[in-house]
Image (cartoon, grey):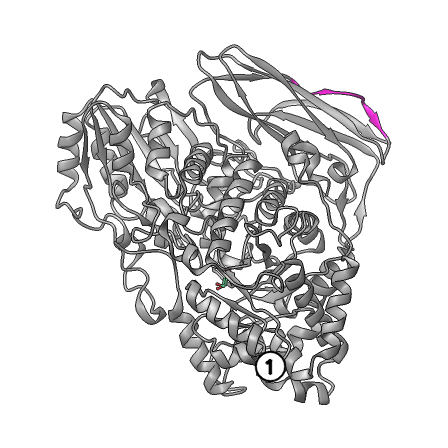
């Protein structure tokens, strides 16, 4: 079976050859366990600063230029290690890591260890649900646990930095990378960003089971025009600060010591050459003293493309005439480490003598990199235990698999459950139908580290999971195929259209729609596994359509026509357009790409061992033409009203509502949430107000509810979003049980950034909405004096 681990050596080698040739207060409103995640940024320890300065004083210019170099696994050689290269990424062979580290530590003049990095996004070998799924749990413990297991397994391999968390807020379901983040909301994104950083780094990332986190992609990468990856972003200052920067700030406050600048340009300035965002905001305003590495070939991409300057390799932004100029632009804007391209290393001396870069800035970049290496304990423990790293038993420990299963269960969202079709009965026969019943890629999803069907731990398919959970027979009919040739060699464009990727022909078992209908007729209950292939999600996988590809809707229609209650389980990495789907099945469970234990976790939910309690971290639109659609939009002078023409609406849609709102999700039980009660109705600008809601399980089984708190400022100097999430708590209640949930709101909640980048707290009314989704209607209000 194909692996989705994504591009590995292929791209690295291609570019390497080309270059060789050419040269806040967010913790306030989450559970008490996560209070511990409150910002803890410490001033740099004196002894570390002394060591950094002493080492810097001994470095030659060329050694400094080596230190700011970050090479891929396909590029790095012994000579680089000996010359004192700073960092290496994507190398996952412990013996090679150890070998290069020995060369660096023993044969380079200053014995500075190399920092080895990897994209551990939702697991290294034990794969957790994709981050968009994890965010659906509305439980930061899920993000923290995933990051902690990922850090531990990465560290066993000899890695000391992960390019995670990805905290790009996105309103763009067409964008494939929406799968890597926490969705459309800056508050939810901030809570998850902080939790993941804490899970990755702990309180001290020199610990042997911890690694340093790199927050990415700084900044605005989640909002590319048209949803096309790498494309331009253009936005107002207030949007940048209110929507896109907060998760980065939360990650930095939680201690993240590295940041990756992004490919996209923001208001005309590419992410890795943006002095305003890199130096002015991140380093000066926020006090970040770690380092910024460029994304892949982002420095090279600053160059103009031929014919302006004929050259090899990536180019495009056109803010630099050639490679050396690009290196200078990046360094002087605040980028400290150059990934893949080698302009600073190769031309740095000339750039210094030409005055294009300054020694002060170069020294600063080197100090930042050394600071992180000292904090990481690399000088004390540079080597990896190769035997342990090479032993399959070191990964996927039973306790970690249990965590992955728990996380996946908590991440699933029940979108529909008519006639209590779910949970299924374990004593009745089940027909599993659809192309996702036995695949690995749709369990693991994109950026799945080194999770695979070849390496331990073994992943669990949906069919295996259902069989293990049911005491009655489970049959499987693929009904149609799933193409797995979407990681073509040499980065070629896939030769097929999306409709060819899923359900374009008979299943691998030779079955068709008619076989599926027969299987459904023969069984007591039907599970239809539908969605997108894992290859349709992730980097460079933008889609222009958001519906189920291929003839999946026809398959659903035919199976539903049997009259059996049909349960659809969705595997996907983005909000889909389910308008053609939603009416046909009795139940729909959004499973995302659930990870190594995916099959078991889905079975847990389908058969009722786990009661689903996840909520959508993204809006599900009605048709791709309505994109972007998101809950926290600004109001309009002509708010949408389907009954009146001269309004902000679509003439071909009878409603203003999306198909499923942000924060929406059902349970096998029911809940009642009381109107929000405020501790006071007037509050000073620097004061705070508490908001309480009682939540009661009114059904007959235990379950989870996510109590959500939104606010709106109806009269402000800048038109304010119609709702903004400012608190949530996931509670578990027995049948009949109730509890009180309390949130605290202060100026960090009711204030906002204006278009000059200033945080303002304005007097006036603040409306409060409480409930079980962004459509919450229970209100209260207070006045800021
Ligand atoms: C991606 C980053 C990733 C880097 C290194 C880039 O193409 O945009 O997210 O960390 O590659 O693998």
Residue displayed at 74% across by 86% down: 355
Q: Which residue is mark 1?
A: 345
Could one spot residue 335 in this view of the protein? yes
Residue displayed at 49% across by 42% down: 650
Per the rendered image, the range of residues in magenta is 675-683
Q: Quadrant of the C terminus?
A: top right
* Image location of residue 711, percent across then percent down: 69, 32
Residue displayed at 29% across by 37% down: 462
Q: Looking at the picture, tell me which residue is in the foreground, 89 or 179.
A: 89
Q: Does residue 511 appear left or right of residue 334 in this picture?
A: left
Above-or-below relation of 575 to 528:
below
Residue displayed at 31% across by 69% down: 489
For label 1, the crowd category at 10 Å Cα-Cα, with few meaning under 14, some 14 to 19 and many 20 or more, is: many
* Image location of residue 473, percent across then percent down: 18, 26
Q: Quadrant of the N terminus?
A: bottom left
Above-or-below relation of 686 to 370:
above
Above-or-below relation of 426 to 150:
above
Above-or-below relation of 766 to 15:
above
Count of picture labels = 1
Could one spot residue 659 in this view of the protein? no
Q: Looking at the picture, tell me which residue is in the foreground, 414 or 387.
A: 387
* Image location of residue 718, percent across then percent down: 75, 45
- The image quadrant of residue 528 is top left
Tell me the SS state at disc 1. Answer: helix
Task: Decide whether residue 361 is among the magenta residues.
Answer: no
Q: Does residue 512 appear left or right of residue 328 in this picture?
A: left
* Image location of residue 471, percent across then percent down: 23, 23
């Amino acid at each position: 079976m194909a692996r989705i681990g994504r591009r590995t050596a292929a791209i690295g080698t291609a570019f390497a050859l080309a270059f060789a040739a050419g040269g806040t207060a967010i913790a306030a409103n989450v559970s008490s366990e996560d209070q511990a995640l409150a910002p803890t940024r410490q001033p740099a320890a004196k002894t570390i600063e002394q060591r950094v300065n002493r080492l810097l004083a001994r470095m030659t210019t060329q050694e400094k230029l080596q230190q700011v170099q970050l090479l891929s696994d396909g590029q790095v050689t012994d000579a680089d290690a000996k010359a004192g290269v700073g960092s290496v990424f994507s190398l996952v062979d412990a013996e090679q890591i150890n070998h290069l580290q020995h060369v660096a530590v023993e044969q380079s003049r200053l014995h500075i260890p190399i920092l080895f990095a990897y994209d551990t996004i939702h697991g290294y070998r034990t794969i957790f649900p994709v981050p968009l799924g994890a965010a659906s749990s509305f439980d930061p413990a899920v993000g923290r646990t995933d990051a902690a297991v990922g850090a531990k397994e990465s560290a066993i391999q000899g890695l000391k930095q992960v390019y995670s968390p990805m905290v790009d807020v996105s309103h763009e379901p067409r964008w494939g990378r929406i799968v890597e983040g926490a969705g459309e909301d800056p508050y939810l994104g901030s809570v998850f960003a902080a939790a993941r950083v804490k899970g990755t780094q702990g309180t001290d990332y020199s610990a042997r089971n911890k690694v340093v986190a790199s927050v990415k992609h700084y900044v605005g990468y989640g909002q590319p025009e048209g949803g096309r990856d790498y494309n331009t972003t253009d936005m107002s200052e207030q949007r940048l600060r209110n929507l896109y920067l907060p998760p980065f700030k939360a990650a930095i406050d939680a201690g993240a010591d590295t940041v990756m600048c992004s490919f996209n340009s923001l208001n005309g300035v590419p992410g890795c050459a943006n002095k305003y965002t890199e130096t002015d905001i991140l380093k000066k305003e926020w006090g970040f003293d770690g380092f910024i590495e460029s994304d892949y070939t982002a420095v090279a991409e600053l160059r103009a493309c031929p014919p302006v300057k004929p050259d090899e390799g990536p180019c495009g932004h056109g803010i630099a005439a050639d490679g050396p100029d690009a290196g200078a632009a990046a360094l002087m804007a605040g980028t400290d480490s150059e990934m893949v391209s080698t302009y600073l290393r190769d031309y740095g001396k000339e750039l210094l003598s030409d005055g294009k870069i300054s020694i002060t800035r170069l020294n600063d970049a080197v100090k930042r990199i050394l600071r992180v290496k000292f904090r990481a304990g690399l000088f004390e423990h540079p080597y990896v235990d190769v035997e342990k790293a090479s032993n399959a038993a070191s990964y996927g420990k039973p306790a970690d698999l249990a965590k992955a299963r728990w996380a996946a269960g908590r991440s699933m969202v029940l979108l529909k459950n008519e006639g209590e079709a779910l949970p299924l009965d374990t004593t009745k026969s089940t027909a599993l139908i659809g192309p996702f019943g036995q695949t690995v890629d749709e369990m693991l999803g994109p950026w799945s580290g080194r999770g695979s069907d070849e390496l331990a731990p073994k992943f669990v398919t949906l069919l295996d999971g259902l069989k293990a959970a049911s005491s009655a027979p489970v049959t499987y009919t693929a009904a149609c195929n799933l193409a797995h040739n979407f990681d073509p060699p040499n980065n070629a464009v896939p030769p097929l259209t999306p409709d060819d990727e899923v359900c374009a022909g008979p299943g691998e078992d030779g079955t068709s729609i008619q076989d599926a209908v027969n299987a459904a007729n023969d069984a007591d209950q039907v599970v239809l596994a539908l969605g997108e292939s894992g290859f349709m999600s992730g980097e460079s996988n933008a889609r222009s359509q958001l519906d189920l590809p291929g003839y999946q809707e026809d398959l659903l229609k035919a199976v539903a026509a049997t009259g059996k209650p049909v349960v659809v389980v969705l595997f996907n990495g983005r909000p889909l357009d389910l308008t053609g789907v939603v009416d046909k099945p009795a139940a729909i469970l959004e499973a995302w790409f659930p990870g190594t234990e995916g099959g078991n976790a889905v079975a847990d939910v389908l058969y009722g061992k786990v009661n689903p309690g996840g909520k959508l971290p993204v809006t599900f639109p009605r048709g791709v033409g309505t994109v972007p659609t998101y809950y926290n939009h600004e109001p309009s002078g002509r708010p949408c009203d389907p009954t009146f023409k001269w309004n902000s609406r679509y003439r071909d849609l009878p409603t203003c509502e999306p198909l499923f709102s942000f924060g929406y999700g059902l349970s096998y039980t029911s809940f009642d949430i009381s109107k929000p009660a405020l501790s006071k109705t007037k509050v000073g600008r620097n004061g705070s107000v508490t908001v309480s809601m009682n939540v009661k399980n009114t059904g007959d089984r235990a379950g989870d509810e996510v109590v959500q708190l939104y606010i709106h400022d109806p009269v402000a100097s800048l038109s304010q979003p119609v709702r903004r999430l400012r608190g949530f708590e996931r509670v578990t209640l027995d049948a009949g049980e109730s509890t009180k949930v309390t949130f605290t709101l202060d100026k960090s909640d009711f204030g906002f950034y204006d278009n000059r980048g200033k945080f303002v707290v304005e007097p006036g009314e603040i409306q409060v909405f409480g409930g079980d989704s962004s459509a919450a209607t229970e209100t209260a209000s207070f006045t800021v004096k």
